[in-house]
């Protein structure tokens, strides 16, 4: 690509968000919190032209993500002929952009579904009310937690972030994060984000305490006018129903005004897919792998 790519820095947050907000479909991967948080793990770099910000991943190999900006008004035939030279692989391409590219008269393009990257979308109302047989097990576990423990919900604020960092360290010990690269990477990203909480725009968070001790927390952000994005949700499984409780209580406290909650992708992990499906998704943001040659 004939663009100048540079490492992601927190200082470009305003500029990046200006372009991101013009995207007609906002997938979880492209929130600035995710781009900046995972930049070291994936070797993410950004390049800006007049109308778009381009994203390049350099680890474990060079691939591109979808550019962010005003997709509908971009001259894709000219852009792809000018800026994308030779064989290029794009991953995590949201369906809206994939369809725009599909309808362009450009070089050979191979577009394939990437199921592991699909975002799961849920109804905020459903996850707060937990009505009907679909949510029977979730509601039972939530009720058990509420009845069994002397609990308190608190919003995550800068003065208690260190407690969340400490709980995350404990969670990693319980789950033996060091044994798997996936959990080790996620742990580094969570700590990175929590430690600059006040500098990242739009972050929301909440925690559950039992007898004064952190037992669960959530980190989220508003990704669109009608959608909350859940980045991380962790709980101490010694407290039965803690995951169901933080899920419901956080949305009850923070979900007003939002129709949907985006709980990110499953990355083809079977157990994670099963867990996400168990909450009865309303819809998905489909994503694709696109090869231009």
Image (cartoon, helix red, strand yellow):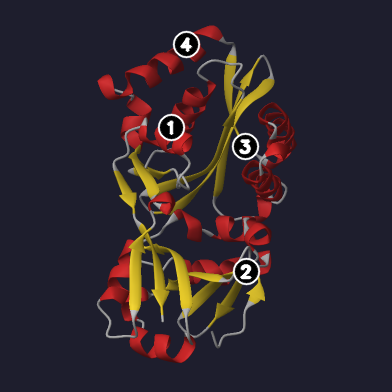
Badge 2 crowding class, 10 Å Cα cut-off, few under 14, some 14 to 19, many 20 or more, is some
Residue at the disc numbered 4: 144
Q: Earlier in the sequence, mark 1 or mark 3?
A: 3
| CA–CA distance in space, label 2 to label 1 | 30 Å
**Disc 3 or disc 2, which is closer to the eye?**
2
Q: Is residue 57 left or right of residue 126?
A: right
Q: Earlier in the sequence, mark 3 or mark 2?
A: 2
**Disc 1 or disc 4, which is closer to the eye?**
1
Q: Say what secondary structure mark 3 lies in.
A: loop
Q: Which mark is residue 169?
A: none
Residue at the disc numbered 1: 275
Q: In percent of the image, x 57 and y 85: which residue is there?
A: 3
Labels 2 & 1 near each other (Cβ < 8 A): no
Image coordinates of residue 9 in percent, x first then y, are 68, 67
| CA–CA distance in space, label 4 to label 3 | 24 Å
Q: Which mark is residue 156?
A: 3
Q: Which mark is residue 58?
A: 2
**Disc 1 or disc 3, which is closer to the eye?**
1
Q: Say what secondary structure mark 1 lies in.
A: helix
Q: How many marks?
A: 4
Labels 4 & 3 near each other (Cβ < 8 A): no
Image coordinates of residue 213 in percent, x first then y, are 69, 20
Badge 4 crowding class, 10 Å Cα cut-off, few under 14, some 14 to 19, many 20 or more, is some
Q: Is residue 257 left or right of residue 43?
A: left
Q: Earlier in the sequence, mark 2 or mark 1?
A: 2
| CA–CA distance in space, label 3 to label 2 | 33 Å
Badge 3 crowding class, 10 Å Cα cut-off, few under 14, some 14 to 19, many 20 or more, is many
**Image quadrant occupied by the C terminus:** bottom left
Q: Say what secondary structure mark 2 lies in.
A: loop
Badge 1 crowding class, 10 Å Cα cut-off, few under 14, some 14 to 19, many 20 or more, is few
| CA–CA distance in space, label 1 to label 4 | 19 Å
Q: Earlier in the sequence, mark 4 or mark 3?
A: 4
């Amino acid at each position: 690509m004939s663009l100048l790519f540079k490492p992601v820095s927190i200082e470009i947050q305003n500029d990046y968000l200006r372009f991101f907000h013009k995207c007609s479909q906002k997938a979880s991967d492209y929130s600035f919190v995710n781009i900046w948080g995972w930049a070291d793990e994936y070797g993410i770099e950004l390049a800006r032209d007049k109308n778009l910000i381009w994203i390049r991943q350099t680890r474990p190999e060079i691939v591109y993500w979808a550019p962010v900006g005003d997709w509908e008004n971009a001259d894709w035939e000219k852009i792809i002929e000018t800026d994308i030279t030779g064989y290029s692989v794009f991953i995590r391409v949201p369906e809206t952009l994939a369809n725009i590219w599909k309808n362009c008269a450009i070089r050979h393009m191979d577009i394939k579904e990437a199921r592991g990257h699909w975002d799961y979308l849920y109804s905020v109302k459903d996850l707060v009310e937990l009505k009907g047989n679909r949510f029977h097990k979730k509601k039972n576990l939530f009720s058990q937690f509420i009845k069994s423990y002397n609990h308190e919900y608190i919003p995550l604020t800068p003065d208690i972030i260190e407690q969340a960092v400490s709980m995350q360290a404990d969670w990693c010990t319980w789950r033996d994060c060091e044994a798997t690269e996936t959990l080790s990477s996620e742990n580094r990203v969570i700590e990175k984000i929590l430690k600059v909480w006040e500098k990242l725009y739009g972050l929301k968070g909440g925690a559950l305490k039992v007898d004064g001790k952190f037992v669960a927390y959530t980190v989220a952000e508003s990704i669109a006018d009608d959608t909350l994005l859940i980045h991380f949700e962790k709980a101490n499984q010694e407290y039965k129903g803690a995951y169901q409780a933080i899920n419901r209580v956080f949305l009850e406290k923070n979900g007003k005004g939002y129709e949907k909650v985006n709980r990110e992708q499953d990355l083809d992990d079977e157990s994670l897919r099963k867990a996400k499906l168990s909450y009865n998704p309303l819809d998905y943001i489909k994503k694709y792998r696109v090869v231009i040659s």
